[in-house]
Each structure stands twice: as structure tokens, then as C-alpha cells.
Amino acid sequence: MGTAGASWWRDAVVYQVYIRSFADANGDGVGDIAGIRSRLDYLRDLGVDALWINPWYPSPMADGGYDVADYRAVEPVFGTADEAAAMIEEAHARGLRVILDIVPNHTSDRHAWFQAALASPPGSRERARYWFRPGSGPGGAEPPNDWQSVFGGPAWTRVPDGEWYLHLFDSSQPDLNWDNEEVRAEFEDVLRFWFDRGVDGFRIDVANGLVKQPDLPDLGPHDEEGLLLPPSRPDHPHWDRDGVHEIYRGWRRVADSYPEPPVFVAEAWSPSPERLALYLRPDELHTAFNFDYLRAPWDADALRKVIDESLATVAAVGAPATWVLSNHDVARHVSRLGRPLTPGAYSLAHLPPVDTLDRDLGTRRARAAALLMLALPGSAYVYQGDELGLWEVEDLPDEVRQDPTWERSGHTEVGRDGCRVPLPWSGSRAPFGFSPDGASAAPWLPQPADFASVTVQAEEGDPGSMLNLYRNALRLRREHPALGGGEITWLPAGPDVLAFSRGHGFACVVNLSQAPVPLPDGSRLLLASGPLDGELLPADTAAWLTV
Ligand code: GLC
């Protein structure tokens, strides 16, 4: 790809491929690299700029691949190294960049390093790559401290010789010790391994978790913690410690040593915009996910506030903003926006019960939310299936659930499987073209029968579908000089209405009120998220306008 796009990432639309659930080419019920290759034209035609592929490395899949056994290889269920190389090349040939997912906070317990640590005695070099400690209490029978796993239960597991090891996630995901030089050198080498293979960047998993306070003090009483939530207190012993920044400066040096420097996007749950901005300083990471935006309720004041704060945060360090509505860790936004407002809630555990869901309302708002997001300055993330209007599958049978949250919470939290159900591509019955005809296995999570109405095939034929809304919006976003990077200027608007201009005669109006509102005088419609009511913009509808 040419150097002309050296800043491509500043306003890229990045499509998140949850590989297990995207497309299954070999019929084993699990998505694979061959499936991605077969759908690259679909992604090009959708109009996105880049793919972010969730971890595709060898893994026992205790946490959907975020338990990596070998960072330099490809999980055989997903394909081969040759297929990965071909996919990268074919994506590039279509003008699509490829971002992989790196998981530096922890390895799988099957990783060679952890296996060696288990086989080595306390105090050994092998154990020093992780956090092994004696227990507390009589006979060391209690965990070394009071830290809890994000997935529920204690963050420590005991090994047969009596020591305990730290895991902020599942017990099969031991935390690496980033004070250890071998760990630092290893990951810089892993980055080079994939950059040498043409990868355009990395999403950094749990980027705020790598450094621990070395004496591992108790956390004490604290607020709830979880994926995407800000750390529960300042000077937290294991989230967002100042020491992480030195690591990312090193990573940036690695990236910048390439003629077309690859880029990073951080998953960093941060206590404040100021703390998040530290990750985005010019010698650190390029971008970070905007979880405050994802967690904002469907409310004009709240959205305007988070948009202003986000833009101010990144402007202070010269980074672009990012916007995201859903990912593989949260309930799909159709199902969030279709419920009574619950500010900040993003998982089924914290949202009102399913009998409060109005899916049509959620879909209408999701359409408006897409136009709002794609009109904001910066880079945007589309989670696979957003463009089809998929909803959270809330009635999966318990026996198919795979998210470790389900077991570790003692079956009190269903976890994240409902947003990971395989995509419906075509046809009227499962597997809806996810797997080929005559597949040897059913999709790894069952698809609901009503996915028939939201297959790619069904939506392609319907001019009013979510898919065609995304296609039109992404095409306009590419063509219109106002969209992508740049400034935003708020325009006067009635209560519960967001209106802003982006220069070049472009404006976006989103009606979050209960009643129709007039459009700005003399404006001409470019695209609307739903039918207008004469000259009026109905409730829960967004419009892109020439003014
Ligand atoms: C990140 C991933 C999530 C995973 C966790 C542990 O938050 O997005 O899916 O479970 O890290 O690796």
C-alpha cells in the first residue's frame, strides 16, 4: 500500500472481525481465515478501511482466544500461517489494512513459558516471568492478597507445590510479570514478527493492566470492577499504573522503525480523560477505544458531553478521537438502546431484563447512532453484525455458553456469548450461510431462527436495510470532504436534539426527543436513518444534510 495513506488511521473505519463467528469455510462450525478471505469483497464493498481481527493464535479457547499459547503461530482451527499471509496480501490488494490483536497481560496456561514455570521450583527464572507467590494465612492456604478476577472469584490459583499464581482473568490466563526483561524483549520481538509479515497494526488487549505494584498490596474495599469500567480507585495496584507508558514507548520505537509505521489502538479502561490521554502522547500509542462513548446513554446532553470531552482529551496530545458502539465484550447496542435508559450499563448483568426490550426501538436508535458516530471527526469501529442490525441473543441455552464469566460467576452472569453468535449471511435456516452446505458441524453457538430477516442476502435486496444504510453512509463518508478528520461546530437545536456542522456545508442532526423536529432552514437531505415525516425529522432519527 502506498505511503500516501500514512495517516490513514486518523479517520479510518475499522471493522472488527470476531473470527470464530465471521465465516466458516471448512464446515467445522467455527469461523476461519479461509472464511475471511472469501468475504473480503463484502468488506471492501461495505466501505471500511481496515479489519481488526480478534486473536487467531493457537489457544485452548478458554477465553475465546484471549488465552494465547503461541504468539507467533495461527490456531489450526482457524487455518495456517500461509493462509494468514495470503489473507493479509488479499486484504491489501483491496485497499484494506489489517490489525491484529496482541494479548500482553497474560498468556494461556498452555504457553511454553507457563508450562516451564509449573515444572520449575519456586524462585526459578521460569516462575519469575509470571507472578508466583507463597500464600497467606496458616500454611499459606489463603491467596497472597485480596485481588479478584475480572471474571469473578479470586485472582489467584494454587499449584501443587503450594505457591499461588496471579490471574486477573480466568485461572487459565496467568498474568505475565512485566518487570521481567525477558517478557519485555519477547513482546517486542512478537511485534516485529507480525510487522515483518505485513500487519498494519495491533489492538492491545488490557493495555492498562500490564504493570503491577511490586509488593502486591491488598486492594481493600472498592467499587465494582470489570471489563471496560474505569479502575475503582486512584493509584490502583494493578490498573493504569504509570509504568505501562515506558512499555508503549518501546513498542512505538519498534513500529516507527518500519518505513510505513504500523499503528496501535489501546484497550485501556481509564479513570479519567487525562489518564487516557497519557497513552496517546506522540511517542506512545496512536489511538485508544472510547469506552465512555460506548457506555453513554441515548440522551442528547450525555452524548454531547462525552463527545466534547473525547475531542478535548485527544486534542491535548494531538491524537484523533475514536468512536465505538459495540464489540465482542458488550451486549449489542440494538439490545441496549431498546431498553429503558441505564446510564453506563453495557452487559446483560447490568441492563434491565429482556421483557423491557423493544427491539424495533433499539433498531431505530441504532440506525441513528450509526449516522451520528460516522459523522464525528476521528476513527470509528464497527463490530461485525452492527451493519446488519444484529441484536444480543439473550436466550442461548445454558449448556452452550462458553464465556468463562458464566462458570466463574457461579452461573449468576451469563456473560458475552450473546454478542458472539455466528453471522447470518444467506438463506432462511441456520447456519444461514455461515458454514457451507453439507457442513460437518453446527455453528459453535446456535443462531436464532429470526436471523433469517437480517442475513446479508436479505438486507442487500432491501434499500431500507441497516446494511444499505451503512453502505450509503460509508460511501458518503469517503466522498464528502467534510467527513473523516476535522472539526465539529455545535448548531443551535431544540431540547434533546444534537445538531452540528462539519464545515463544507455538511451538518448532522439527531433527534433524541420524543417528537418530530424541523430540519434547519434551507437544508437538503443527503441521508437519513429513517423516513422523514414530511419536512420533519421524527424521534430517534438522524439526518446528514447539506446546509
Ligand atoms: C479484553 C478482551 C476480552 C478478554 C479480556 C481478557 O478485555 O476484549 O474479550 O476476555 O481482555 O483477555
Image (spheres, helix red, strand yellow):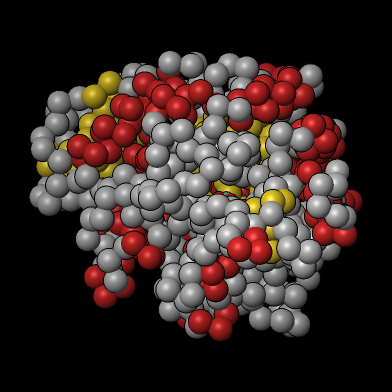
Q: Residue at the location (73% across, 20% down)?
A: 253
Residue 232 figure quarter: top left
Residue 152: percent from the left, percent from the top? Answer: 50, 63
Quarter of the image where one finds residue 349: bottom left
Is 426 or 269 nearer to us in this picture?
269
118 vs 48: above or below: below
Q: Is residue 160 left or right of residue 175?
A: right
Q: Quadrant of residue 174?
A: bottom right
Up/down of 461 relative to 184, above or below: below
Please name whichever residue, 55 or 370, is drawn nearer the observer in this view of the structure. Answer: 55
From the viewer's side, name the closer residue of 543 and 122: 122
Residue 364 appears left or right of 19: left
**Residue that lies at the very extreme toward the front in this rendered image:** 138
For image coordinates 44% across by 22% down, the residue present is 314
For the C terminus, give its image quadrant: top left
Q: Is residue 455 left or right of residue 24?
A: left
376 relative position to 533: left or right? right
Residue in the picture at 47% in, 24% down:
277
Q: Position of residue 57 (x, y in %)?
A: 77, 54
Q: Position of residue 451 (x, y in %)?
A: 48, 73
Q: Residue at x 53, y 43 (%)?
A: 217
Q: Position of residue 288 (x, y in %)?
A: 52, 33
Nearest the eye: 443 or 501: 443
Question: Is there any visible trace of residue 213 in the rendered image?
Answer: yes
